[in-house]
Amino acid sequence: MQVITLIGNLGQDAEIKEVNNNKFAAFSVGCTIRKKNGDKVEEKTTWYDCSTNNLKVAEFLKKGTKIYLQGRFKLDTYWSEKLNKWVPKINIFSTDIELLSAKKEEGTATEKTGTQATTESGGNGGDDLPF
């Protein structure tokens, strides 16, 4: 079984696309690794091109939102004119997406593609927890 799990931030709002009469949401996720080097903190971000056939979650996939994603991956390449060489690219078809944060003015939302359950709060940041 081939599975990849990511926690990262969306690079742009999800886009609805259609190929061969099949609609899907396309988006990119950036995962950043931070490493301390003396007094400096170095960051390296890896970007993943992602898609899901759960169109209900697409409206919540906004730039900057932190998400948990699980799915299948495929390694591909593309030609970079800037680098003048072939560059590896990882494409992920997500089977499970959970929103970990949303823009403050929009409140919070959680969407699991497997269960298709949605929970929204009124923008209070989750302060209504019973404990």
Image (cartoon, helix red, strand yellow):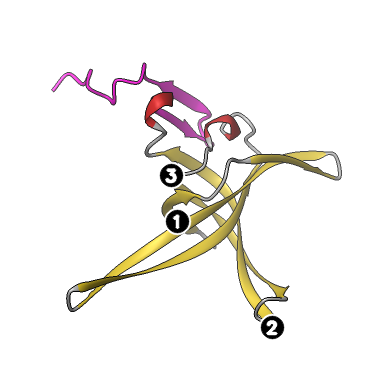
The amino acid type found where label 3 is placed reads Ile
Q: Nearer the viewer, mark 2 or mark 3?
A: 2
87 left or right of 114 in image: right
Q: Where residue 118 sits: x, y (%)?
A: 47, 24
Q: Report which residue position mark 1 lands on.
A: 5
131 left or right of 73 in image: left
* 2 or 1: tag closer to the N-terminus: 1
Q: Nearer the viewer, mark 2 or mark 1?
A: 2
Q: Where residue 123 sits: x, y (%)?
A: 35, 21
Q: Label 2: how many residues lie within 10 Å, few (<14), some (14-19) or many (20+)?
A: few
Q: Label 1: how many residues lie within 10 Å, few (<14), some (14-19) or many (20+)?
A: some
Q: Main secondary structure of the magenta part?
A: loop
Q: Where residue 53 sits: x, y (%)?
A: 66, 40
Q: Where residue 73 sits: x, y (%)?
A: 59, 61
Helix, strand or loop at mark 3:
strand
Of residue 131 and residue 122, the one placed in the foreground of this image is: 122
Q: Residue extending furthest bottom?
A: 85
**Mark drawn on residue 67:** 3
- Confirm whether the magenta stretch covers residue 122: yes
Helix, strand or loop at mark 1:
strand
Residue stretch in magenta: 108-131
Quadrant containing the N terminus in the rendered view: bottom right
Q: Residue at x 72, y 76 (%)?
A: 81
> Compared to 26, does 80 lie above or below?
below
The amino acid type found where label 1 is placed reads Thr
> Compared to 42, does 29 lie above or below?
above
